[in-house]
Amino acid sequence: MLSERIISAVMRRGNDKYLRFSNMEKPELPPAIAGREYLLYVHVPFCERLCPYCSFNRFPYEQSVADAYFERLRVEMRMVAELGYDFASMYVGGGTPTIDIEQLVKTIDLARDLFSIKEVSSETNPNHLYPQWVDPIVDRVDRFSVGVQSLDDELLRQMDRYDKYGSAYQILERLASIDGVFHSLNVDMIFNFPSQTPDKLALDVELLKKAGCNQVTFYPLMASPAVAESLKSTVGRVDYAREYQYYKFITANLAEIFEPASAWTFSRVGGGMIDEYIVDYEDYVGIGSGAFSFLDGTLYTNTFSLRSYNAAIDEGHSSVVAERAFGKGDRMRYRFLMQLFSLRLDKRQFARDFGAEIEWALAFELAYFRAAGAFTVDNDTELVLSEKGRYLLVAMMREFFIGVNNLRDQARAALSGDERRLLFGDGCDETGRPLVVAVADTESAETLPVP
């Protein structure tokens, strides 16, 4: 689709500008602004095994390393409280947040003690849908999001998930076993994987309609350049030309049971909570190695090195290492992107917050979207997306996150010593023994390449 190709190209060029960070002389987050709403994002960078298509900051799980990390994570949480931040919502992502359930429980409980937490979201993987993982958090987590990615066994094998997490049949059984346990059960899926055929996508959609979940998120494959090259050499080149057709198929075939809740999330008609913290909160604080924060128009990133993260917390300061401040025009475009991603933009709120009418502040962007037929409602008070408009937002978010994933890839590639070998080598030392990051070693490491 021509409009998608144009907007994707614009987003790629924009990423070079928007994701250009500067190292911080003083590694600290700013204090909270009174009266502003914030979300707390908590990053747990551990997985049993590392998926080849994933660019998130993650390391192979080892209990002693995880224990030391979680202890410091809770110290960092107290630091954030001392800066005056309060949160009504908490999102735990990874990695695999449920990989150490006792530590996760301690972390959620501390957050509820420190802040005005009313809802908690947590990600997990299909092999943790058993009582030993579910029971301790059933009264602590409101929104549970399961990374399934596909219900085709061949694709699961290609993603290196079949042996780890089970067959499609086993995953569906586990999903059914926790039906109704959480207020919101979301299933994360990937569409437009190189070897995904229309028949495989149709199978995913039909099985999900029968699964015990009240929300489904279909992410387009968001492969950074490094991941795209790896996929090309194994399962094939990513084909964006068919992405819109796949998206239209998903939307049409879910419509009987699910309705759009964001550009790529679908909730069962009459219920569900959107499992997307970026939809509900513009400002958020991220704690943990590899986490991002967005505060008052500035994007911050924490160190991607576990060793440097531990050292920073032990020294009594934040783990943030770089920042990118956005001007008023860029902030308005960010609002445009994020509010439309949630399907509706409030023109009156935009004018109040920026002191400018969107009609002239973002005249070019509006003209382009109107020409593309992106709106079903376009009046004095609001903009509401059409199906084509929703797909344009999917494409824009895809390119934005590809840029973020590329940044993550660069940051992880800049790691040194045993941390680098854990991620890019065979995970063993010179004697063939499994590597473990030495958490007591405070030797500094490269954390983020700044263009």
Image (spheres, rainbow, N blue to C red):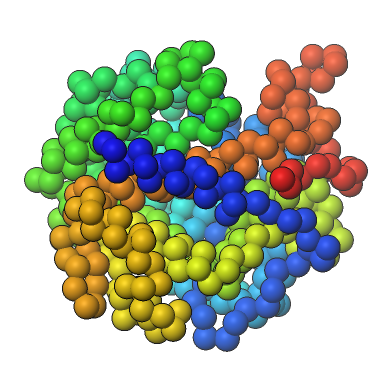
270 is higher (above) or lower (below) than 249: below
The relative height of residue 175 versus residue 299 in the rendered view (above or below) is above
Point out the image quarter for the C terminus: top right
Residue drawn at x 62%, y 78% as measured from the top left: 32
Count of marks, rendered view: 0
Residue under the point 53% across and 72% down: 328
Task: Identify which residue, 44 or 229, lies in the foreground.
Answer: 229
Q: Which residue is drawn at 82% across and 66% down?
A: 26
Percent position of residue 352, x then y:
40, 84
Q: Residue 20: tell me if it is visible.
A: yes
Percent x, y for residue 167? Answer: 35, 22
Q: Quadrant of the N terminus?
A: top left
Q: Nearer the viewer, residue 222 or 136?
A: 222
Question: How far from the left and from the top, in percent, is residue 116?
Answer: 51, 77
Q: Is residue 349 left or right of residue 61?
A: left
Q: In this view, does 308 lie to the left or right of 245?
A: right
Relative to the observer, which residue lies in front, 236 or 268?
A: 236
Return the residue nearer the eye: 141 or 189: 189
Describe residue 46's horizontal placement relative to residue 124 as left or right.
Answer: right
Q: Is residue 87 above or below residue 161?
A: below
Q: Where is residue 255 in the image (x, y as percent from the top left)?
A: 13, 46
Q: Residue at x 22, y 33 (%)?
A: 245
